[in-house]
Amino acid sequence: MSHPFENLPTTPRAEEILDKAFSRATRASGSKTGIEAQQSMLMTASNIISDNLENVATQWPTIDELDPFYVELADAVVSETDPADDDPGIDALKQHLSNISWAGRKAKEIRQEYEGRVVRSDVDTSRKLRKQAFARMADITEQVAEDLEAVSKARDALKGLPDIRPDEPVIVVAGYPNVGKSSFVNRVTRADNEIASYPFTTTQIRVGHVEADRIRYQLVDTPGLLDRPPEERNEIESQAISALEHLADTVLVLVDPSGECGYPLAQQLELRDDIESLFDAPVLTIGNKSDRSTDVEADHFMSVTEGDNVQEVLDAAIEAVDWEIELPFSDE
């Protein structure tokens, strides 16, 4: 199962829709003459315009029915695609889709309005009426040109969201840069399960997987999000963190008591306290680089580079998640 935006088709531009509609309308009338030719052109152009516009809207998932994680993360991503918009974000996207759907319906209404008049007219009048209908359909399509462009940008950005599944347990790995987060995730993730990097604004969300007792756990590393104080995060990054709050079943905050990461231990612990205040899930403090120092109060110690106690830390995270498989039947 992919994430809800992964398979969205390319969004056509207004000019592309009109070029396609009118060129095919011309070809459709090639074997016909008189009023029949005008009818065929009107029907073909209307169908192409209305189908293309309505398909743009209907092929998107229903936003309000998505998991809150994807709603909030999409809101943050879409805000980034058009920061100049007075009302950016998921609500603006929904309005763009609504406008496009309206234009598709309007193209049908224009055809219905003109087809009876075309049939009842002489050849010259029917040609004029068909041209009037084309002009109105073109005007309607051009009215939503900016909506189509905005939806196209949103689609391109949202296709890059990570495939994080709300129905599987999530372990978030946090901490300052250079404390060993990515090394830990790399080490515990199965060798045959690639850790993918996904673009998100100026940062990345990296997702790896590990299985234990027939349960697949998702390990989420968030460079650029949960690796610095809250006052240094912009609004969009804070919103992305809010999205993660919906998913996290436990959080591992890695600290480097040796200070070799470049950040004082006190500063690292302040970040840990901030993360504890954000998440309702269990937060475990993990002292990494234990071969260098264990001078910190932590739930567990490990050294990823030396391979010391790494599996034990993963086991502790899984235990904190406390996830049970839902059986398809029950005795109750």
Image: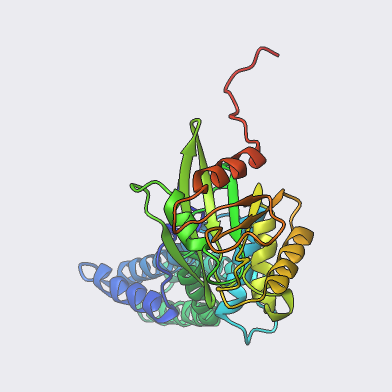
Is residue 190 rendered to the left or right of residue 250? left
Q: Is residue 63 visible?
A: no
The percent coordinates of residue 31 (x first, y second) are 20, 67
The percent coordinates of residue 186 (x first, y second) are 43, 56
Front residue (pair 179, 127): 179
**Residue drawn 54% across the image and 76% down it:** 201
Quadrant where the image shows the N terminus: top left
**Residue drawn 49% across the image and 71% down it:** 157
Q: Residue furthest left?
A: 31
Q: Is residue 182 visible?
A: yes
Relative height, residue 293 to residue 324 (above, below) = below
Q: Quadrant of residue 99?
A: bottom right
Relative height, residue 110 to residue 212 (above, below) = below
The percent coordinates of residue 210 (x first, y second) are 46, 44
Relative height, residue 22 to residue 324 (above, below) = below
The percent coordinates of residue 310 (x first, y second) are 51, 48
Front residue (pair 27, 332): 332
**Count the marks: how many?**
0
Q: Residue furthest right?
A: 277
Q: Residue furthest top?
A: 331
Is residue 32 rendered to the left or right of residue 300? left
Front residue (pair 193, 110): 193
**Scheme by which the image is coloured:** rainbow
Relative height, residue 6 to residue 29 (above, below) = above
Quadrant where the image shows the C terminus: top right
**Residue drawn 39% across the image and 77% down it:** 18
